[in-house]
Amino acid sequence: MVETATKKKVGGLAGIVAGDSAICVCGAEDQSLTYRGYGIEDLATHASFEEVAWLLLRGELPTSHQLTQYRARLKTLRVLPDPLKRVLELIPRTAHMMDVLRTGCSFLGNIEAHQERDPFVSSDRLLASFGSMLLYWHLFHKKGQAPNMDSAQDTVAGYFLEILHGKAPDDLARRALDVSLILYAEHEFNASTFTARTITSTLADYYSAVTGAIGALSGPLHGGANEKALELIQRFPNREAAEKGVLAALANKELIMGFGHRVYTTKDPRSPINKVWAERLAKATNDKVVLPVAECIEQVMWREKKLFPNADFYSAALYHFLRIPTPMFTPLFVIARISGWSAHIQEQREHNKLIRPVSRYIGPDRRPWIPIERR
Ligand code: COA
């Protein structure tokens, strides 16, 4: 006898332990987050994104010498091969930027798959080059010719801002982006990471796993929420309009993007850190609208629904203050999360077991075949 749909629905693998991992704890009890045992607050205060990427991928913090060498290596790896540039030039300017990265990653897999034998080569390559892929495509279409991608910046954040804006960022801007990349770097068995692990578990190649993960991250319930969050904030000219608009949206049973979380129940530990950096940037840019509206939305959501901002909400404001175009928000998540994905792909490979769960069948009981003329 099959189980029927009248039974309580199971879905989304909520609360299911789907495997062992030594990379990250997304703590439901104390609303905390650690990477390889280090608290996110310490990492966001003391570390750089490159240090965190090394930690995630190699398991321990780098020495000063290792970090210098690593940054130099990433600097060389951010230079795009010519065939990839030609492919990026062919992607229409109207494409969604996540699709640009998905194609760029997949194409790189065609021309550099042979490097896969060293587990760090492909991961360092993508970590270094996702930013250049996105900006090359963006600037090529904006300027109508191949852009100059040269920069002396030796950090992922500094390079991104300098190429995007055509001038070196100040320390505040560079560090704000750096911190947001740290906060986005890793988050346990989220949908895109689990996608990457599932693909890896079939013994498929690294680029296939990352390409699939980019697809999963692009959805508005996952990475795409940061773009939607800014669109929401920008709908309102002041706090009063925000209060009214959010109440109306809630009454209409709309989802408010950038709020709520599958694991955290009262606080996303990344959000207060993003908020502090958004506040610093708001002050520096003399903002009188975006941050007050965002804070008002936060207050209304807590008062009305006991829902709190997740990592996407204040990172959206932070990116806005850095004058980053909104369609680049989710790609920036990729630029950061490639470190976590790669660590998980490696871990999956080291202890591989094909990921293949079972479903609970709720369809019809077994029945006799009906010939076509009698249907
Ligand atoms: N706005 C309004 N209501 C929300 C909400 C939001 N952002 N997030 C959750 N809720 C409500 C749901 O409507 C549901 O209400 P109900 O019980 O009356 O039906 C309840 O809270 C539980 O939500 P549910 O969707 O079952 O939780 P989940 O664990 O499946 O979803 C998210 C988690 C993150 C997908 C969900 O909170 C969401 O869609 N948030 C907006 C998108 C987002 O910011 N994503 C980025 C995540 S880091």
Image: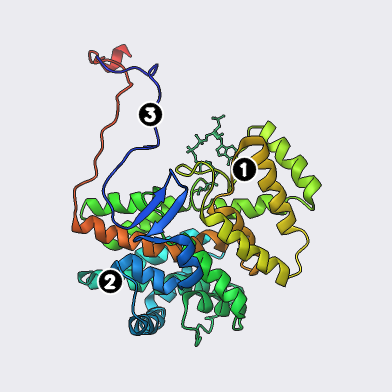
Q: CA distance from mark 2 to mark 3?
A: 38 Å
Q: Which mark is residue 19?
A: none
Q: Residue at x 37, y 52 (%)?
A: 25
Residue 93: x, y in percent? 56, 65
Look at mark 1 in the image and give the residue it sits on.
256
Q: Earlier in the sequence, mark 1 or mark 3?
A: 3
Q: Is residue 203 left or right of residue 279?
A: left
Q: Is mark 1 within 8 Å of ligand 1?
A: yes
Look at mark 3 in the image and give the residue it sits on.
10
Snapshot quadrant of residue 75 = bottom left
Q: Is residue 133 left or right of residue 94?
A: left
Label 2 near label 1: C-beta < 8 Å?
no
Q: Secondary structure at mark 2?
A: helix
User: Does residue 204 appear in this view?
Assistant: no
Quadrant in which the N terminus is drawn:
top left
Snapshot quadrant of residue 312 = bottom right
Q: Earlier in the sequence, mark 1 or mark 2?
A: 2
Q: Secondary structure at mark 1?
A: loop
Snapshot quadrant of residue 112 = bottom left
Look at mark 2 in the image and give the residue it sits on.
120
The amino acid sitting under disc 2 is Phe
Q: Is residue 193 left or right of residue 371?
A: right
Q: Is mark 3 within 8 Å of ligand 1?
A: no
Q: CA distance from mark 1 to mark 2?
A: 38 Å
Task: Compare residues 121 and 154 and report the one nearer the observer.
Answer: 154
